[in-house]
Image: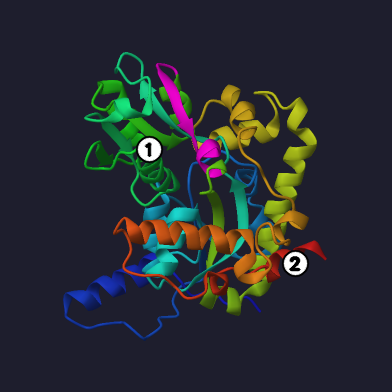
Amino acid sequence: MIKTYRSNPIRSTLKKLALGVGITLLGTQISLADTLTIGYQGMMNPWKTVIADKMLEAETGIEIEWRRFDSGAKVITAMASGDVDIATAGSSPIAAAISRGVDIELVWILENINEAEALVVRKGSGITAPQDLKGKTLGVPFVSTTHFHTLFALEQFGLSDQDVQVLNLQPNAISAAWRRGDIDAAFIWDPVLSRIKADGDVLISSGELSRWGKATFDGMVVSKEYAADNPEVVTTLVRLAAEADAQYRDQKESLTAESPMVQKIAKMTGGDAASVPAVLSLYQFPTLSEQTSCAWLSCGEEGGAAKALRFTSEFLKAQGKIPGLKERYSDYVNPSFAKQALN
């Protein structure tokens, strides 16, 4: 049996009313909702076809509220408040959430970010080398994978956020600020990345920074409570994501702007269909076998995902972005759903 009990307008209204009269709902559960709420972002990836085609609804028969967020930090905040059951976010906001005690678990690696995020500098800004960033203005969504790589890159360049004016801007705000000439640089993902590349130059990519020892990824996280109550839903979602990735790998060489997969991804992300194939090629989408190996979800603290979450958390703590570390990050990585989908 599928248990669904989270966010709907009635529940949200009741919470607001309770707060208005000084009544706390902490520790109580209002079973008024019958909708599974899933938060996602605008990155281009094959799993957007699962959303576009309502595949999960068709397979489970449940009602799903798909909510789009501008950044991982925002979707994780919604998850922490109980308004979202399942979400996709970057490894940095996931690591920050776990370190702050949000009770979630990573169940799927959407993509190894690789070359799909980059630090772009404006043509004519006078920035031709990393040291030229000193005294310049850089836009990035805070607590995102690009924020983590911004701080890491500055550290490698012998700079800090005291030397560079780092502004907390969401993707659409970065696009607008770039058009106005308000910022000299930005570290961001597509579709905004493609737009600013038109009159900018890539200074360094996440792929290069990952090869320096600080890998980043986008992942799917689930409320531990929801996962425990609805393992079949989570397994189905993971399987559908894996099938979408496999379909992409099969079609990769022949994709065009007119391909159905490309059209759906463009529609879901607001990007230009003509740019989708090239953007997708910048990512690496792990197979089910890779997901369930030590490279990603398995092998406890020695697994790739757990290591990445720990390394990211250690860096964020050193930067004063989180208060402390968890003893074991593998406690928040659950390969069981991917293993079930593999069988």
Tell me which residue sits at (33%, 68%) in the image: 12
The stretch of residues the image draws in magenta is 198-210
Q: Position of residue 281 (x, y in %)?
A: 65, 32
Cα–Cα gap, marks 2 and 1 = 34 Å
Q: Which residue is mark 2?
A: 339
Tell me which residue sits at (83%, 66%) in the image: 343
- Vertically, is 4 above or below 63? below
Residue 296 falls in which quadrant of the image? bottom right
Q: Position of residue 1 (x, y in %)?
A: 66, 79
- Vertically, is 31 above or below 289? below
Q: Which residue is mark 1?
A: 171
Q: Is residue 224 magenta?
A: no
- Residue at the bottom extreme? 27
**Residue nearest the observer in this picture, 151 or 221:** 151
**By what rule are the colours in the image chosen?**
rainbow
Q: Position of residue 266 (x, y in %)?
A: 56, 32
Give the amino acid at mark 2: Lys
**In the displayed structure, does residue 121 sit left or right of residue 22?**
right
| Crowd band around label 2 with a 10 angstrom C-alpha radius: few (<14), some (14–19), many (20+) | some
- Residue at the right extreme? 343
**Which type of secondary structure does the marked residue at label 1 adopt?**
helix
Q: Position of residue 25 (x, y in %)?
A: 30, 82
